[in-house]
Amino acid sequence: MPDARRILVIKHSALGDFVLALGAFKAIRAHHPDANITLLTTAPYADFGQACGWFDAVEVDPKPSLWQWGAWLGLRRFITQSGFERVYDLQHSDRTHTYFRFFGRAKPEWSGIAKGCSHPHRNPARNAMHTLERQAEQLADAGIPETPPPDLSWLDGDLAGLDLPDRFALIVPGGAPHRPEKRWPATQYGALATALCATGIVPVAIGTNAEAAEIATICQIEPRTQSLLGKTSFGQIVALARRAALAVGNDTGPMHLIAAADCPAVVLFSRASVPAQTQPRGAAVTVIQRDGLADLGSEAVSEAATAIARTP
C-alpha cells in the first residue's frame, strides 16, 4: 500500500537493535515516499530517529508498568486515535502485541507477528534468522521487496577537539552492566593494547562511565592508550570509525555503529549470544566466539585485528 497516508513504525530496543533496524526504516520510507510516518521508540533513540530523516515525527514510548494506568491510557489514545492506516511492528514483543489488541476489531494493516495481523511474517524459522534477514523477509511479506543494509551516511560527529593520533584502533570494552559474561576481561584488552602499540597503532578506548574501571585498567597496563571515556556521542563514534584503522570490542551497541560505518571490526562473543542472529554487520566484520570470554587470549584477538587493519 505505497499510498498509505499515516504509518506507524515501532522500534524500541537497545542501540545495536536500533542500528540493525536502520535499513528497514529506509526501506519503509522509500516504499511510502508521500506518507506521514511516525516512529514510536524509547527516549534514548528519539533524537537518533529524528536525525535520520526517514520519519515525519518521533514519539517516545514511556513503556509504562502495569500499575501506570494513566500512561497506558495516553499511549492507547495515541496509537488508536492518530489515524494510522498501517503499522510496521519491528519490535515483536508482548508489549507491541498488546498495542495491536488496543484496536479491537477496527485494526489497521499490521506487519509483524501479532496473532491475526493482516501482513504476518510467516516464516516459522524466523527466530533463527539474523535480524537483518528477518526484517527484510517481514517487509517483503508486507509488500516491500528490498531492504538495504543499515545506512549511516547521514550521521557524523565533530572530532576537532579530541587530539587523535594519526593511526589508531577503537577499543570498546563495555557492554550491558547486567551481562558481565559478555565482556572480555579488561586485562586482556590491556595486553591487546600493548600488541597494537607495537605495530604503530595507538589504542583509543571509548565508553561511558559504566566502563570507567575497565578503561582505567587498560590505560594502566598500556599507558599509551588514549581514553575518550564519556566523550563520544553516537555521531562521534561513527566519525571515529570512519578514521580508525580497526576496532575491537564486545557484543555491544557501539560495535554496531562502528561496523555499519564500515570500519574493520573484531567482535567478541561468549556463549551468551548467537552471532548468526545478532552480530554487527558491515564491510569487514570478524567474529571470535568462546564459551567464556575469560578463556580467550589476547594473541588470537591481536592476530585477527592486525589481519583486517586498514593500511596506512
Image (cartoon, rainbow, N blue to C red):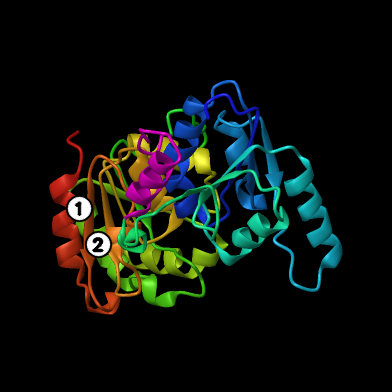
**Left of 105 or right of it: where is 174?**
left
Circles 2 and 1 in contact, beta carbons < 8 Å: yes
**Location of residue 249 in the rendering, given as x and y in whole percent from the top left corner:** 34, 58
Left or right: residue 306 versus residue 49 is: left
Is residue 98 one of those drawn in magenta?
no
Q: At 69% from the left edge and 61% from the top edge, which residue is drawn?
A: 63
Please name the amino acid that badge 1 sits on: Ala
Res. 228 visible in picture: no
Res. 75 visible in picture? yes
Task: Give, as a single range, the part of the protein colored magenta.
Answer: 130-151
- Is residue 143 positioned above or below 293 on the image? above
Q: Which residue is mark 1?
A: 305
**Going by the image, does 17 lie left or right of 147?**
right
The image quarter in which residue 38 lies: top right
| Image mark for residue 38 | none
* Callout 1 secondary element: helix
Q: Is residue 144 magenta?
A: yes
The residue that mark 2 highlights is: 192
Q: Residue at x 16, y 50 (%)?
A: 306
Residue sitting at 34 percent across and 51 percent down? Answer: 280
Residue drawn where x is 46% and y is 53% of the image: 17
